[in-house]
Image (spheres, grey):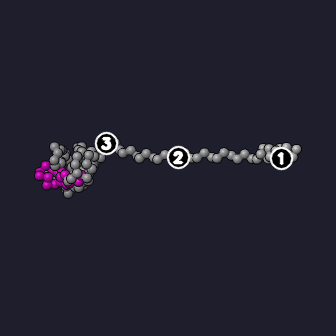
Amino acid sequence: MRALIVVTSLLLVAACKEERPAAAPAPAPVKPQAPEPKPAGPRVVELAVTADGFVPANITLKANEPVTFKVTRKTDETCATDLLIDGTDIKLALPLDKTVEVSWTPTKAGKVKFGCAMDMMVGGVLLVE
């Protein structure tokens, strides 16, 4: 009989215990954010032809990165009425006060001269990395 009381007491104690809530689920892993997409299309470089020549005169570019030059001749007091890029067939007429565009993709690192049609006396350097 004593055994019956002990077993009954154990059953009552077990039945009276509070049930503990289940452990909270682990937080969902944080997904790394995707890098922001690069803008579509070529890099745009704005050039002006002023009394000081091409501004800016030195431009750094990356090999195999397409670039579009937007060039505006702002003065008539210059020989830079055209834009030539050394080593290419690019010869772009530069009408006064009108923006013209030309696209180009440098394929190798180095310095590339650009400037006017008169032996490129007025010009600058494209530094291709």
Looking at the image, is mark 2 or mark 1 nearer the viewer? Answer: 1
Disc 3 marks a residue whose amino acid type is Gly
> Which residue is most to the top?
40
Dot 1 alpha-carbon crowd within 10 angstroms: few under 14, some 14 to 19, many 20 or more: few
Residue position for label 2: 29
**Is residue 100 among what the camera can see?**
no
> In whole angstroms, how far apart are the C-alphas of marks 1 and 3?
83 Å
The residue carrying mark 3 is: 41
Q: Secondary structure at mark 1?
A: helix
Task: Pick whichever of labels 2 and 1 is earlier in the sequence.
Answer: 1
The mark total stands at 3
Residue 32 appears in the figure: yes
In three-dimensional space, the C-alpha distance between marks 3 and 2, rounded to whole angstroms, equals 35 Å
Front residue of 104/13: it is 13
Q: Nearer the viewer, mark 3 or mark 2?
A: 2
Q: Which span of residues is magenta-colored? A: 112-128
* Mark found first going from the N terminus, 3 or 2: 2
* Left or right relative to 124: residue 14: right
* Residue 40 falls left or right of residue 31: left
* The N terminus sits in image quarter: top right
Q: Residue 6 has which mark?
A: 1
Residue displayed at 22% across by 46% down? 107
Q: CA distance from mark 2 to mark 1?
A: 49 Å
- Direction right: furthest residue: 1
Query: Do the CB atoms of the residues marked 2 and 1 lie less than 8 Å apart?
Result: no
- Amino acid type, callout 1: Val
Picture coordinates of residue 80, whole percent (x, y): 16, 51
